[in-house]
Amino acid sequence: MSRKRRAAGLFLLMMLFLFGFYGISMYWPEALPAKGVTVPIPLGTTNAQAIASLARSGVLPHPRLFHLAWALAGYPPMQAGLYEFQGRINQAQVLHRLIAGQSTPLSLLIVPGWRLQDIYQEIHDKAPYLDQQNLPQGAAAARYLARQGVGAQGSAEGWLFPDSYRYVPGTTALSVLRRAYVRMQRELHSLWAGRAPGLPLGDPYQALILASIVQKEGAPPAEQAHIAAVFLNRLRQGMPLQSDPTVIYALGERYTGSLTTSEMHVESPYNTYLHTGLPPTPIAMPGLGSLMAVLHPADSADLYFIAQGDEYHYSESYTQHLKQIQHYLQHAGGAGL
């Protein structure tokens, strides 16, 4: 055998060995720890950083071969996400998941009736992969967010539409809140354009404020349109709304779970027992149901309501209202307007 043939044979054997090693390394499943491995790949992570992070986690035992496989695939972009690996997995499967973005869904939930501080608490407690830098805190947060394009009329309170908002690690909390604000703008202005005629509301923001009060009254969805009618009738007649949730909002952290007589007289523009008209801002994030209730209220002349559990009773006059109180609020748990 000539020297050239021997060299060619050795080269062929070497290539077969390398391709064999490559194939075994890429497609041989590796056993992961029993609890699995979680690897966040945040937005803005370079492909090299993503590979290094996966290697440190133990998911990629051969990162250089993984990089070679990625190169042979044409350097497709790897997607940001939260990747959870369980059981046995090979490097080819890891590469496919990163290119396809097959990551664990993450979402921020905003519940109807939540205040801005509740959303902040949700972000702090249940959204560790959101970038919370530059997220304002404290009493000035609602005003600061409005200046950042999250809210209007100088406040973010009430302006974040309740829903579930998807994100990937590294997404800024501010950007998610901005999406919720844009959604609320869209829903509110659409409903305002198709509102019932003759409402005593001057603009969509007033509708948002009243919807937040209806939302915080905590009534079942079937009752919201009737409760909205009561408040709208009171506005027409210049009567105070007399809504307990506005007083609770005024008290803030001073509220301990039940309103006392002295607390009902707290001096605040949010206290609708002391002041007629609407409070200066919403008191919570109203859901779609309460927005629709305010802009399409029940056909009613009622000015009062009382509730005992999920049972609601309405009255057109104060005399009727007093009779309802005597009849229904003898039992614990009743609340009146």
Image: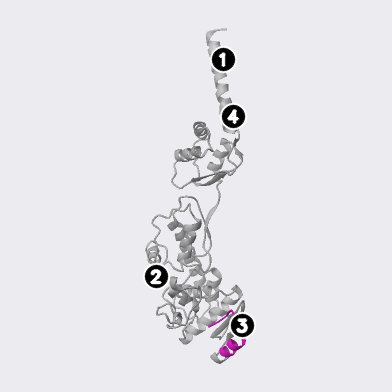
Q: Are marks 4 and 1 in contact (CB under 8 Å)?
A: no
Q: Kindly identify which residue carries mark 4.
A: 24
Q: Is residue 70 above or below residue 335?
A: above
**Mark 2 vs 3: CB contact within 8 A:** no
- Between marks 2 and 4 in the image, the one whose residue lies nearer the viewer: 4
Residue 86 placement (x, y as % from top left): 59, 43
**Which corner quadrant holds the N terminus?**
top right
Q: Quadrant of residue 270?
A: bottom left
Q: Position of residue 284 (x, y in %)?
A: 48, 70
- Identify the residue at horizontal 50%, vertical 42% (top origin): 78
Label 2 vs 4, first from the N-terminus: 4
Q: Where's residue 63, x and y in %?
A: 50, 34
Q: Which residue is mark 3?
A: 331
Q: Mark 1: which amino acid?
A: Gly
Circle 3 or circle 4, nearest the eye: 3
Lower sequence index among marks 3 and 4: 4
Q: Residue at x 51, y 81 (%)?
A: 231
Amino acid bearing label 4:
Ile
Nearer-N-terminus badge (2/3): 2
Label 3: how many Cα within 10 Å (few below 14, some 14–19, many 20+): few
Disc 4 secondary structure class: helix
Could you tell me how far apart the alpha carbons at marks 3 and 4 are, in whole angstroms?
A: 75 Å
Nearer the viewer's eye, disc 2 or disc 3?
A: 3
In primary-sequence order, the first of circles 4 and 1 is 1
Q: Is residue 221 above or below residue 316?
A: above
Separation of marks 2 and 3 at Cα, in angstroms: 42 Å
Task: From this view, report whether residue 17 is shown above or below residue 236.
Answer: above
| Residue 325 located within the stretch drawn in magenta | yes
Q: Amino acid type of disc 3?
A: His
Does label 3 or label 1 sit earlier along the sequence?
A: 1
